[in-house]
Amino acid sequence: MFERLKNRLKFQIEQLLLRGAHSRLLFIASLVGTAAIGGGLLVQATDSPFDGNQTAIWWAFLRLTDPGYLGDDEGLIRRIISTMLTVLGYVLFMGSLIAILTQWLNQKIRNFESGLTPIVRRNHILILGWTNRTPAIVDELMRAEGRVRRFLQRRGARGLHVVILSEDVSLERTMELRRALGGLWNARKITFRSGIPLRMKHLERVDFQNASTIILPGADFAYGSANESDTRIVKTVLSIANQRRANRNQSLPLLVTEIFDPNKVLMVQKVYRGILEILASDVLITRCMAQNVRHPGLSHLFHQILSHGYGNSIYIRTFESLVGSCFGDLARACPKAVLLGMVRPHGETFHSMLNPSGDLILELKDRLVFLAQEYEDCKILKKFPLKQSSHQSQEVSHTRVNGERRILILGWNHKVAALLKEFGRYLHEQFEISILSLIPSAEREAELGWKGIDQHRLRITHCEGDHTSLSDLEAIHPNSYDNVVILGSDWLETQEESDARTIVGHLVLKNILEGTTQKPEILVDLMDADNIGLFQDEDTEVLVTPMIASHVLAQVALRRELNVVYEELFGAGGAEICFRPVADYGIAGQKVSFGKLKDISADRGEIALGVRLESGSIELNSAQNKTYILKEPDDLIVLVQEAAV
């Protein structure tokens, strides 16, 4: 019975202490009061030095709370009781009070660090979710200082502030982003908040309704699969759209999101009632891969164009003074930039026209598209020389892309179907494709059939095996192919594990190709940019696919017209970038300026972007008066219509 009462008392005390700091303070205060009453009554009963019990209790309370009174007492009994009260005061009053306050303060700091406090901001850039895209998105936003400033000025905002909604907010997460940004890190411009975008309460925590732009990235690994990532994104868009139905007076901010499966794009467009830009990332990335297979060397150019601050980027500007001008007359209007084409509004969206006909007339709301190092370089001269020749381009014979190409794909992930579909869009070229994977052939064929891939026109062959196994890879003779594409493995749990497998597969492939006379062009699908340095071979190119998606998301969030520009630039049909041998132009060994190269290309219906030298170095948008003595192994980098490739 006594044991039960003791346990009940301990349980009641435990429940009281767990209620919070105020309950703990109340408990300690009761103990201090009890000790003061007991000590006061004890000294009054043994020594009777005071006028009454109240004075004795006050004497005991002072000894508990202030040890300085200890020397004022006289008499043995009073000193013994005073000493006991003073020691007890150190434990109860000072020790417990400091411990409770310290614990309370630490708890409050942890709560603040966990990002549970709602923010109140306007025109911030909101990123919903922490994935393998998020650090690169923030990096691109921090680098594109001028583009961000112009974007915010259009909305009346003062400066950049990025808010990230993450399921896990901790010091480790902050340090991870700080390491990724390096010298770009600025704690005053970045705020973490804890939560998931599927819950409206968490969306309100980041003040999503007053954001200038919402970026909703996908994830290769965080949510288990590309399909699960798409599902979460669709649910999140629905959550944001439902808020619009609840408050019809509140307009929704610009939403830039990523969808892996292009079949879900139309669904998301119907759900969201605000301004929406959707990046079909599987389509974009596989377009870059297909272009790189057809034109080896483009990966270096993609890295420069899509990464702000690493050379030339694509800019869009409006010049009302040029309305009514012919596009062909503007070739020399901007000496520090290359004019690529224009973007024309089409309802609520835009239509991209790169390398259009010279007779195309600029309309009132048309935007010009430039390739330049800085936005300020895209200025039009007040008086620029008009081109005297006709806008009609000359017919010139060119060395064409290989009409039949044998491609070996090593591995299998959610991008395979989109990659094969992209190859199938090049109707004037033939592809013979072999796929080596551990996934059973019947399962792969069923998936491709379900996604509408014509496996007969592309002549697809499925092989079962592990591309990290020397014997399995030797059996299919990789040296007999024109191109080898090594895909990342999205069935692994992390991007580090995926890249580790990719690196091993590349090493096995290089071991087999060593000593062979015929070597294919190798393209590697990498997940982590930190591993780029492991691929230094001249015949190996690397595309860090999450970084490509991240940079495009960030750039489209700041200038939404770029979405349609990249769709045309990297896709089949329309304009595309390719390498033209110098021999096609008859200028090998001659001294020519880059301005002259632009004129020569323009006469052939092309737009010269730069040169690729025999050493492999790429120079884009050189100064007009910079001269070259090009050799036959050198190439011109030009923007052409796909039909002319």
Image (spheres, helix red, strand yellow):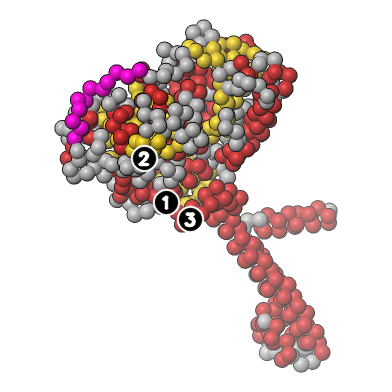
Residue 27: x and y in percent read 66, 65
Q: Residue at x 70, y 18 (%)?
A: 474
Do callouts 2 and 1 mark residues in contact (Cβ within 8 Å)? no
Identify the magenta region.
386-397
- At label 3, which amino acid type do we have? Asn
Q: Nearer the viewer, residue 172 or 205?
A: 172
Image quarter hosting the C terminus = top left
**Distance (Cα) linking label 3 and label 2:** 42 Å
| Amino acid type for the residue under numbered disc 2 | Thr
Distance from disc 2 to disc 1, alpha carbons, whole Å, reads 44 Å
Q: Which residue is mark 2?
A: 627
Mark 1 belongs to which amino acid? His
Q: Earlier in the sequence, mark 3 or mark 2?
A: 3
Residue tagged 3? 186
- Number of the front mark, 3 or 2: 2
Q: Residue 119: within the magenta?
A: no
Q: Is 95 placed left or right of 482 in the picture?
A: right
The residue pinned by badge 1 equals 161
Which residue is pictured at 60% across the width and 28% down the height? 488
Q: Are marks 3 and 2 in contact (CB under 8 Å)?
A: no
x and y, in percent, of residue 453 in the image: 50, 12
